[in-house]
Image (spheres, grey):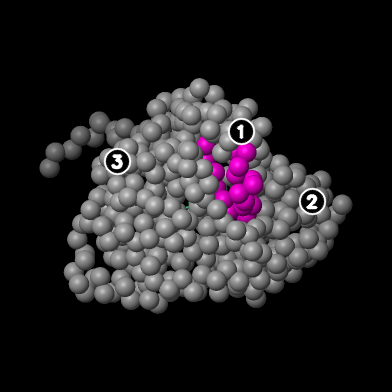
């Protein structure tokens, strides 16, 4: 056997495009909490953006049937004909939108749809306007694609919604996209027709800017809030809107990895080039399951929404009862985004000063054994995000622990 003892392996070198991009802070906190659990600590994890419900049985059955029928092969690149038909039906039924199959793309989650869109459209230096607080992946996907995220702060006083004035200030000749997410991760804020109108009017004045509407939390809205999507509101700019949605959140199908986008055929075609050279089609079995989710009975959506609303009320009331925490009531999704400004400057029983939302969340994890995510992970401080997609029992216990840990802080 030949040995080359004098030749050392070259050290690993990551590509520049990912060198500054870390693993999401949400996943890191989740990993730390999971490690504490393995060490025997009873940790309540309110970090993950994932419904605790199970995938509905009819959806699972559809997957079994597809496997038995032998639907275990490659499908058309960006979604089978039947899957695209199901997406068409969904847009017609829920949003009053009529898309042709050439205007629809199906991928491994809404995440891949958004990634494909950025990869297909961004050249170095191209800008994407991202209102903050924002789902962290947006900015990192934009960077990987070579673009520049332009973060625009949205005030808690304005319900964390983007205003037309801040949008106008952020638009430059290099702007390619405006990213909007309603209801929002992490704030739960949602845009009504009246909220969207001034933003869409602004886009009418800036024809080089496209709109990516992330509607993944469409079905999780409360108190009679009427969900609307921009493509249905403003036909004049429909030819530059990509509407993104998926089955992960509404149908508790995070692991199946199916999301879809609808928009102009030129864009959809460019996105399919990216998909053709990366993953090819999303799982054939998951597509069969998603067809059932989108076209079968939708009755459980209402039940699940009601259950989420009870949990939301529990968390909002519980947090607001704690001195130093201020929690606005979200209109949708399954997150609260509360201010912990009142905790800053207080001292832990161990003598450490809470100086930031990161310190506060680290304290909650070690002292209360409750994992939540600091607002700084979403570009806004001092806040913290709770995902309340878990049982009422667990939420009550978490609130008791958070209240006790906060009471133990010296002012
Ligand atoms: N958009 C938002 C705002 C999200 O919170 C998520 C999931 N965390 C996604 C998109 C991606 O969903 P998926 O890829 O599971 O469809």
x and y percentages locating residue 81 in the rendered image: 25, 57
Which of 375 and 55 lies nearest the eye of the viewer? 55
Local crowd at mark 2 within 10 Å, few (<14), some, or many (≥20)?
Answer: many
Report the residue at 38% width, 76% height from top: 58
In this picture, is 378 found above or below 366? above
Asked if the magenta segment contains residue 186, the reply would be yes
Secondary structure under badge 1? helix
Secondary structure under badge 2? helix
Label 3 beta carbon less than 8 Å to ligand 1? no
In this picture, is 20 found above or below 59? above
Q: CA distance from mark 1 to mark 2?
A: 32 Å
Label 2, on which residue? 343
**Relative side of 217 to 194, left or right:** left
Q: Which residues are magenta?
A: 178-199
- Kindly give the residue lying farthest to the left in the view shown: 1
Location of residue 407 (image quadrant): bottom right
x and y percentages locating residue 220 in the rendered image: 56, 62
Local crowd at mark 1 within 10 Å, few (<14), some, or many (≥20)?
Answer: some
Label 3, on which residue? 269
Secondary structure under badge 3? helix
């Amino acid at each position: 056997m030949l040995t080359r003892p004098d030749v050392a392996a070259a050290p690993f070198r990551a590509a520049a495009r990912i060198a500054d991009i870390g693993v999401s802070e949400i996943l890191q906190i989740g990993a730390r909490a999971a490690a504490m659990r393995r060490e025997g600590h009873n940790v309540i994890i309110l970090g993950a953006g994932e419904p605790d419900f199970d995938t509905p049985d009819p959806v699972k059955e559809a997957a079994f049937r597809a496997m038995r029928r032998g639907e275990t092969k490659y499908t058309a690149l960006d979604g089978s004909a039947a899957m695209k038909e199901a997406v068409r039906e969904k847009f017609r039924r829920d949003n009053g939108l009529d898309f042709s199959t050439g205007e629809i793309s199906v991928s491994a989650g809404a995440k891949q749809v958004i990634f494909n869109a950025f990869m297909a459209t961004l050249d170095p230096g191209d800008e994407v306007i991202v209102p903050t607080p924002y789902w962290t992946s947006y900015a990192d996907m934009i960077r990987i694609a070579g673009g520049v995220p332009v973060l625009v702060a949205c005030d808690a006083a304005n319900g964390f919604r983007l205003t037309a004035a801040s949008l106008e200030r952020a638009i430059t000749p290099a702007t390619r996209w405006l990213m909007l997410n309603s209801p929002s991760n992490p704030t739960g804020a949602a845009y009504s027709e009246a909220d969207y109108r001034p933003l869409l009017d602004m886009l009418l004045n800036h024809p080089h800017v496209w709109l990516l509407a992330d509607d993944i939390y469409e079905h999780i809205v409360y108190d009679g809030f009427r969900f609307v999507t921009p493509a249905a509101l403003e036909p004049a700019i429909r030819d530059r809107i990509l509407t993104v949605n998926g089955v992960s959140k509404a149908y508790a199908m995070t692991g199946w990895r199916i999301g879809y986008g609808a928009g102009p055929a030129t864009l959809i075609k460019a996105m399919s080039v990216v998909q053709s050279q990366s993953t090819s089609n999303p799982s054939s079995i998951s597509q069969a399951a998603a067809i059932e989710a989108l076209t079968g009975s939708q009755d459980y959506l209402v039940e699940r929404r009601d259950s989420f609303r009870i949990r939301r009320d529990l968390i909002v009331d519980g947090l607001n009862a704690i001195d130093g925490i201020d929690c606005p009531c979200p209109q949708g999704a399954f997150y609260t985004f509360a201010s912990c400004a009142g905790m800053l400057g207080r001292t832990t029983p161990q003598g450490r000063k809470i100086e930031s939302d990161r310190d506060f969340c680290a304290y909650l994890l070690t002292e209360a054994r409750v994992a939540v995510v600091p607002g700084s992970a979403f570009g806004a401080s001092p806040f913290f995000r709770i995902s309340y997609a878990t049982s009422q029992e667990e939420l009550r216990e978490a609130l008791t622990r958070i209240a006790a840990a906060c009471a133990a802080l010296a002012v």
